Image: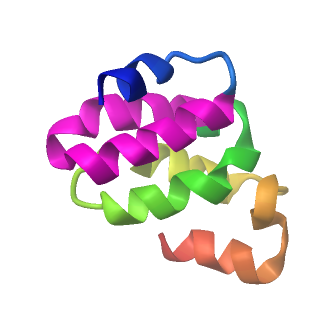
């Protein structure tokens, strides 16, 4: 887990997202601040990371209250990146 925490500062969005997801799976709720601290900025900077961010947020829904503003902001965008540009996946985002 220490190595995963170090990688939360990696320069590549997807590395941070995958490491944050792994950190949540291993450490659970105590890792929430670190996980959200990596997931939310990555998603905001690179909407295509939503493919990986939203499933993790679904698993952390009780702890992910900080994600609500970003989720709403993504829903307000006329065009979304990543897999959310298709209707079916867009509806999936709306269900989060």
Residue pictured at 47% horizontal, 30% vertical: 38
Residue 94 falls in image quadrant: bottom right
Extreme residue toward the left, this view? 30
Which residue does the image show at 61% across and 32% down from the upper left?
15
Please give left or right for residue 69 compared with residue 10 in the image.
left
Task: Examine the residues drawn in magenta and state their main secondary structure.
Answer: helix
Colour approach in the figure: rainbow
Percent position (x, y) of residue 18? Answer: 54, 43
Closer to the camera in the image, 6 or 73? 6
Q: How many marks?
A: 0
Which of the two residues, 27 or 75, is positioned nearer the viewer here?
27
Magenta stretch encompasses residue 15? yes
Residue 30, compared with residue 34, is above or below; it is below
Residue 47 pos. (x, y %): 72, 44
Residue 64 spot, x, y in % from top left: 31, 50
Left or right: 72, with 79 as reference point? left
Q: Is 75 drawn above or below residue 34 in the view shown?
A: below
Residue visible at 36% across and 36% down in the picture: 35
The magenta segment is 13-42
Residue 64 seen by the camera? no
Magenta-colored stretch includes residue 38: yes
Answer whether residue 96 is visible to the viewer in this image: yes
Residue ranking furthest to the bottom: 88
Quadrant position of the N terminus in the picture = top left
């Amino acid at each position: 887990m220490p190595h995963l925490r170090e990688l939360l500062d990696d320069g590549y969005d997807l590395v941070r997202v995958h490491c944050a997801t792994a950190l949540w799976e291993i450490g659970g709720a105590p890792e929430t601040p670190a996980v959200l601290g990596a997931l939310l900025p990555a998603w905001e900077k690179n909407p295509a990371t939503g493919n990986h961010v939203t499933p993790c947020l679904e698993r952390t829904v009780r702890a992910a209250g900080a994600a609500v503003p970003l989720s709403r902001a993504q829903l307000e965008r006329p065009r979304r990146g990543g897999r959310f540009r298709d209707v079916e996946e867009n509806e999936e985002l709306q269900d989060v």
